[in-house]
């Protein structure tokens, strides 16, 4: 079993004080623990249902370093399997996507139906003489569940339900996933690349790092894409689900029409699909950015093909897949409302692809910063180097906010990140076999008036 | 896009002249990119130019497509290329400050079609060739490379050759670059 670095144990005390050891962002031991204790037990995003619309459609995805086949069987049921033949462990599916009724291993020819059932064993009679029970040797199933088109998988048979795991964050996710009663679909296959970047800094950034935007993406303001000033930029809300790790930042710009930057058919779609409470939170949203713990994120923001033109809102979904210590495989999709015209979907995608993806004007600067910080935080003594997570330590949550969890205003704060890293630490410090108890995650804020109680 | 549909071009003096003309034009264009003279580079595109890099997906042999019909890494016109360049020209393009060193190695040029029936200054040719793009950045000794195949529609205008449509086919389905803050 992997030993726990001492600085992780110490982090339990320093995190509530807003201090995090830099080493967590690039450490082989941490990566090993993440595989054994986090990605082995969390609900990990696999695919959007629209990626496998027809019976037989499949995609290949990852949970940690395990290749997973996600397939819609002939009856329309979605199933997930470990992409490994039960005879020698060879990969049975080698294409990233496609349509198949069966998966046949190219080594000895064992053949599995897309239900996972072992149906073909060459020379069955001669080599097994009736001693092989095919029922016992189907593909290894992976437990899956869905929410609003998102398919998640977990390797932990005892994990809480996905509904419990999301813990009310569905309220916020609906802004990304329900732009109309029919929901969303992916516009294209995911764009993927690998970089020397730790997945965690990306997950954190998309948990609501409004602090970096005016600096890291200053070009957007300099070229005239965004009229918002430094002052209005901070307006809005930050919310998180305590103990679950999920967090969102919602930037508000006052004085705009409801659901600004969305085409009329999407404004109408939101009004049909969202509850009055959700509408009250999102109708003034200039942008919103959220992370589902551990490594799935969403962003809605406006952009245009030329500076000064009215921005059109796009939605990106991204998976920060860990490929090693300080190494990421990036997956990014553009989600479009299902109910709008093909022309409008394309228009939204073009705006998205100018902003995000490896060549995206926003993504370029993010990956420069994230790659460089991942490199610095790999230093041999980075465990002694504390990073400042001090924003909002003594803030009071809003008492009349209609959404679940804790919400704060303005939106630029680091409260949600302390909850994110507290949740992450809770997984890493909970031994295998024990339930990861969300109530063990320390609070992410200590309002001044309760300071004595927190001591 | 299938190679078997392309006849091997017949070599005559016209072809040899054109081959060298295009090879020189493309080499010059590549040098402009390496030297980061992006405004001059942009001037080599026609006003109606398309610059696109489809997402590649690993598919089974015989699948309907490997290059996504909808997904693009770059989905650009001359107008959006100008936006990218304007960004790089600001003081805030952190991804390229200090700048990357990017080299373009061009080879395997084939001129696969010529439209002689168009008026003199609108004649177009289709050129296909490989480009190995190598990026070096900062003090890192590692390189990032992108192996590509280009299909260009080049138009002969009164100002010389111009790029009317460039499709860049990438070989990786998972790129090994931190970003694409340069052009392919």
Image (cartoon, rainbow, N blue to C red):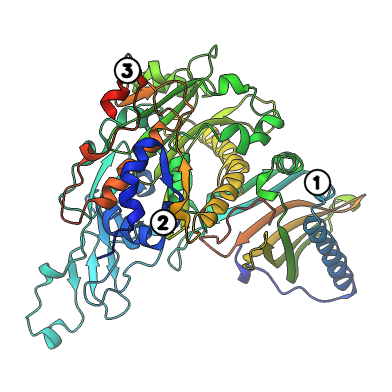
**Mark 3 surroundings: few (<14), some (14-19) or many (≥20) residues within 10 A:** some
User: Residue A8, can we see it?
Assistant: yes
Q: Callout 3: helix, strand or loop?
A: loop
Q: Are marks 1 and 3 in contact (CB under 8 Å)?
A: no
Q: Callout 1: helix, strand or loop?
A: strand
Q: Report, in whole angstroms, how far the alpha carbon at label 1 lies from the one at label 2.
A: 42 Å
Q: Are marks 3 and 2 in contact (CB under 8 Å)?
A: no
- The dot on residue A322 is 2
**Mark 1 surroundings: few (<14), some (14-19) or many (≥20) residues within 10 A:** some
> Given the image, what chain letter belongs to the residue carrying mark 3?
A
- The dot on residue A402 is 3
Q: Report, in whole angstroms, how far the alpha carbon at label 3 lies from the one at label 2.
A: 35 Å
**Mark 2 surroundings: few (<14), some (14-19) or many (≥20) residues within 10 A:** many
User: Residue A150, can we see it?
Assistant: no
Residue at horizontal 20%, vertical 53%?
A156
Q: Is B55 rendered above or below residue A233?
A: below
């Amino acid at each position: 079993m992997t030993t726990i670095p001492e600085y992780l144990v110490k982090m339990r005390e320093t995190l509530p004080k807003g201090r995090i050891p830099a080493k967590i962002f690039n450490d082989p031991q941490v990566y090993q623990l993440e595989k054994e204790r986090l990605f082995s037990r969390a609900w990990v995003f696999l695919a959007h249902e629209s990626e496998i619309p027809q019976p037989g459609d499949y995609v290949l995805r990852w949970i940690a370093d395990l290749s997973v086949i996600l397939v819609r069987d002939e009856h329309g049921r979605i199933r997930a399997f470990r992409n490994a033949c039960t005879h020698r462990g060879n990969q049975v599916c080698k294409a990233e996507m496609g349509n198949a009724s069966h998966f046949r291993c190219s080594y000895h020819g064992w053949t599995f139906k897309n239900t996972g059932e072992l149906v073909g064993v060459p020379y069955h009679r001669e080599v097994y003489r009736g001693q092989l029970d095919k029922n016992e040797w189907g593909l290894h199933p992976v437990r899956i569940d869905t929410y609003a088109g998102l398919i998640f998988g977990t390797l932990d048979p005892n994990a809480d339900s996905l509904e419990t795991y999301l813990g009310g964050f569905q309220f916020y996710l609906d802004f990304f996933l329900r732009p109309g009663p029919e929901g969303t679909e992916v516009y294209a296959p995911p764009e993927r690349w690998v970089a020397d970047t730790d997945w965690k800094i990306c997950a954190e950034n998309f948990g609501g790092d409004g602090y970096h935007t005016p600096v890291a993406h200053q070009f957007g303001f300099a070229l005239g894409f965004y009229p918002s000033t430094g002052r209005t930029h901070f307006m809005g809300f930050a919310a998180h689900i305590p103990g679950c790790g999920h967090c969102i930042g919602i930037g508000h710009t006052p004085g705009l029409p409801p659901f600004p930057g969305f085409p009329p058919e999407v404004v109408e779609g939101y009004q049909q699909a969202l509850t009055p409470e959700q509408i009250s939170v999102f109708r003034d949203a200039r942008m919103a950015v959220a992370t589902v713990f551990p490594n799935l994120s969403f962003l809605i923001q406006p952009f245009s093909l030329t500076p000064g033109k009215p921005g059109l809102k796009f939605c990106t979904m991204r998976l920060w897949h860990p490929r090693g210590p300080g190494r990421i495989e990036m997956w990014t999709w553009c989600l479009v409302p299902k109910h709008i015209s093909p022309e409008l979907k394309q228009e939204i995608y073009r705006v998205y692809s100018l902003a995000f993806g490896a060549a995206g004007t926003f993504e370029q600067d993010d990956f420069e910063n994230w790659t460089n910080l991942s490199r610095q935080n790999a230093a041999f003594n980075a465990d002694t180097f504390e990073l400042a997570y001090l924003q909002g330590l003594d803030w009071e949550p809003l008492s009349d906010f209609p959404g679940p969890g804790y919400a704060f205003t303005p939106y630029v704060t680091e409260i949600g990140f302390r909850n994110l890293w507290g949740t992450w630490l809770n997984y890493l410090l909970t031994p295998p076999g024990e339930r990861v108890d969300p109530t063990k995650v320390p609070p992410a804020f200590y309002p001044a008036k309760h300071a004595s109680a927190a001591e | 896009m299938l190679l078997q549909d392309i006849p091997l071009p017949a070599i005559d003096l016209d072809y040899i002249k054109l081959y060298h003309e295009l090879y020189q034009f493309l080499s010059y264009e590549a040098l402009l990119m390496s030297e980061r003279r992006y405004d001059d580079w942009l001037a080599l595109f026609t006003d109606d130019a398309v610059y696109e890099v489809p997402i590649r997906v690993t598919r089974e042999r015989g699948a309907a497509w490997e290059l996504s019909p909808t997904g693009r890494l770059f989905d650009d016109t001359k107008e959006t290329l100008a936006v990218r360049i304007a960004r790089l020209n600001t003081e805030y393009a952190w991804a390229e400050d200090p700048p990357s060193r990017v080299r373009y190695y061009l080879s395997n040029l084939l001129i696969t079609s010529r439209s002689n029936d168009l008026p003199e200054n609108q004649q177009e040719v289709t050129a296909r060739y490989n480009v190995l793009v190598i990026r070096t950045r900062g003090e890192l000794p590692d390189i990032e490379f992108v192996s590509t195949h280009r299909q260009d529609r080049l138009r002969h205008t009164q100002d010389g050759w111009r790029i009317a449509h460039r499709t860049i086919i990438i070989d990786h389905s998972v790129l090994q670059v931190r970003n694409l803050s340069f052009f392919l």
